[in-house]
Amino acid sequence: MINPMAKVGSIEAFRSKRSEELGLVYEKFECQCADCRITKRIIKGGSVQYVYQCVRCGEPKGSAIKQIDAMRLSGGNEPSIFDLKLMDAYRNAKLLAVSKVKQKYSDSVWWDMYDAYLRSPEWKNKRDAVLRKSPLCEGCAKHMATQVHHKTYCHVGDEFLWELVAICKPCHERLHDHRPLHEVAHD
């Protein structure tokens, strides 16, 4: 069986890859609005406003322009209508691209691979080595160790043995207890 963590690595590396890919998406959709045209748009209350609109992303650029200046800059012709569909399509394409990267690199995907790793022969061998080295729980020193806890997820799949702790089930559950402090304090 191939180690499922070999491709992904630590959760930090996984999140770093996600950030890098998100950066590329944001970079792809970064628009300098270099190619703009004058448009006519209707704003609240039915008023008409003349603005530059980027032909790539559809965003308005700069402040409103006086009608006389808009007509002059348009060669005496009435400017075309502001294209809301262009702006919406660009925004939606960006949201979709970001959403795809976030889904691809969701933490649940990493945890699914981590769970698969915990069922692998590689993990079984490491787990067994840690339990042989420390048969007594390193948390309470009262019970036999039956579980192995990761002190860090930095090297998951390629852990150093000192990053793993032999521990009993009650101590492991206590370690992973995420209840509010006021609930834990009264146990």
Image (spheres, rainbow, N blue to C red):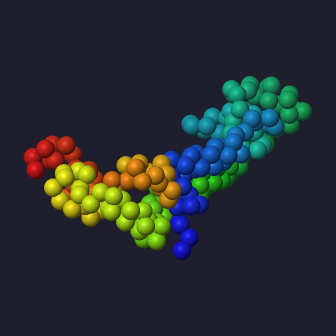
Q: Is residue 149 visible?
A: yes
Instruction: Specify the quadrant that holds the N terminus.
Output: bottom right
Near-viewer residue (25 or 137)? 137
Which residue is pictured at 21% across the width and 46% down the height? 180
Task: Give how far across and how far down residue 31 sits, in percent.
Answer: 72, 39
Residue 65's quadrant in the figure?
Answer: top right
Which residue is pictured at 59% across the width and 60% down the height? 7
Q: Left or right: 91 with respect to 159?
A: right
Task: Give how far across and how far down residue 27 sits, in percent.
Answer: 69, 42
> Can you say whether 135 is above or below 46 in the image?
below
Which residue is pictured at 27% across the width and 60% down the height? 135
Residue 79's quadrant in the figure?
Answer: top right
Kindly give the residue lying farthest to the front in the view shown. Answer: 133
Q: Is residue 173 visible?
A: no
Near-viewer residue (104 or 146)? 146
Task: Give how far across and how far down residue 11 sits, in percent.
Answer: 49, 51
Task: Give how far across and how far down residue 36 sits, in percent.
Answer: 79, 36
Kindly give the residue lying farthest to the right in the view shown. Answer: 75
Which residue is pictured at 70% across the width and 28% down the height? 62
Kindly give the residue lying farthest to the left in the view shown. Answer: 186
